[in-house]
């Protein structure tokens, strides 16, 4: 059995309120809430290493971008395919439009991820 490592810290203001909210929501003791939060924080910070693999956030951002793009392209394709003859007639001219839709989606996703609200 390993020895425990006692740790003491003072919490004030919003941090103290947030800690108590977490503790009460999870129905934990102060010690167990501290352990869980410290384990989570260390797992996040220690995995923020020098390797070149993408972070979880980067992966989720890419998934979000692909989902939004797929949804918008599906809407465009659906709108253009109600007339099969028109689809083939205008397929070449619609390429710039499809590229613009993708660009608009990327811009909206970037704004969303930057914390900008829809307005």
Image (cartoon, rainbow, N blue to C red):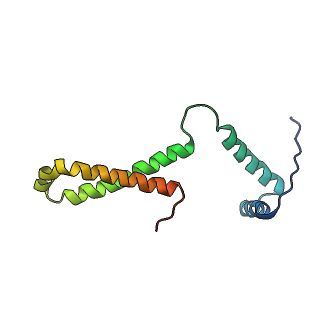
Please indicate whether residue 10 sits to the left or right of residue 75 in the image.
right
Q: Residue furthest bottom?
A: 119
> Which quadrant: the N terminus?
top right
Please indicate whether residue 26 sits to the left or right of residue 59 in the image.
right
Please indicate whether residue 43 sits to the left or right of residue 97 in the image.
right
- How far across and how far down the image is residue 19, in percent? 76, 59
- How far across and how far down the image is residue 25, in percent? 71, 63
- How far across and how far down the image is residue 113, in percent? 51, 54
The residue sitting at 87% across, 46% down in the picture is: 7
Asked if one can make out residue 68 in the rendered structure from this viewpoint, the answer is no
Front residue of this view, candidates 34 and 13: 13
Q: Residue 15 lies in what quarter of the image?
A: bottom right
Q: Residue 79 lies in what quarter of the image?
A: bottom left
- How far across and how far down the image is residue 33, in percent? 77, 54
The residue sitting at 79% across, 52% down in the picture is: 34
- Is residue 35 positioned above or below 112 on the image? above
């Amino acid at each position: 059995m390993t020895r425990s490592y006692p740790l003491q810290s003072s919490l004030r203001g919003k941090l103290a309120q947030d800690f108590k909210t977490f503790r009460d929501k999870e129905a934990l003791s102060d010690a167990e809430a501290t352990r869980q939060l410290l384990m989570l924080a260390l797992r996040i910070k220690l995995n923020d290493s020098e390797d070149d693999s993408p972070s979880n956030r980067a992966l989720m951002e890419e998934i979000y971008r692909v989902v939004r793009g797929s949804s918008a392209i599906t809407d465009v394709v659906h709108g253009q395919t109600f007339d099969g003859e028109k689809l083939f007639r205008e397929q070449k001219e619609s390429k710039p439009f499809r590229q613009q839709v993708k660009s608009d989606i990327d811009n909206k996703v970037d704004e969303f991820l930057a914390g900008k609200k829809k307005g």
